[in-house]
Image (cartoon, rainbow, N blue to C red):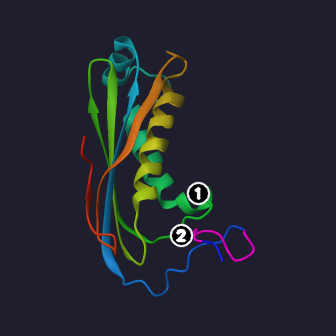
Amino acid sequence: MSDFTHINSQGRAKMVDVSEKDITVRTASAVGTIYMAESTVEMIKSGGVKKGDVLSVAQVAGIMAAKQTSNIIPMCHPIITTGIDISFTINKASIDIKSTVKCKGETGVEMEALTAVSAAALTIYDMCKALQKDMTIGKIRLVEKTGGKSGDYKWQK
């Protein structure tokens, strides 16, 4: 028998059984940043990107991605989310992205929050790649979670 939670007795992948876990309210927040030229940020702010309203589309993409996380992360349980919020902070040469995801269930929503930030950043890249190809995405991390057996977590620098 393996000590790994996602490996069965034959050494193959399995999804962890969460049926005995308590149903609790769980939240998770994640952040990330997409770095770009000041001129690209200005185009986003002014609405000059030909593909449309970059941040509105990125916000919807992040929400949709959070709801589909179990379809792309193999051992992630399908979760019924009860709330998803995506926000942006526009800086001189970057955009910070924050997601907060909430559910009432047996397992947490950390992966959904991280996936939401990732998809929002990728959508910004996709919508602006005609303006700039050397944008970079980084610093994606969980900054807070509440609920569940492991308790609360807050990012400590």
Are the residues tagged 1 and 2 within 8 Å (C-beta)? no
Classed neighbour count for the residue bearing mark 2: other residues with Cα under 10 Å, few (<14), some (14–19), many (≥20)? some
Q: Which one is in front, 53 or 9?
A: 9
Taking the image as drawn, is residue 53 in sight?
no
**Callout 1: helix, strand or loop?**
loop
Where's residue 6, x and y in %? 60, 68
The residue pinned by badge 2 equals 77
Residue 81 occupies which quadrant of the picture? bottom left
In the displayed structure, 62 sits above or below 11; it is: above
Residue 75 is a magenta residue:
no
Residue at the farthest bottom position: 20
Task: Give me the residue at 47% from left, 21% from top.
Answer: 135
In the image, is 110 to the left or to the right of 92? right
Q: What secondary structure characterizes most of the magenta part?
A: loop
Task: Give me the residue at 47% from left, 70% from top.
Answer: 79
Tag shown at residue 73: 1
Residue 52 occupies which quadrant of the picture? top left
Task: Give me the residue at 46% from left, 32% from top.
Answer: 124
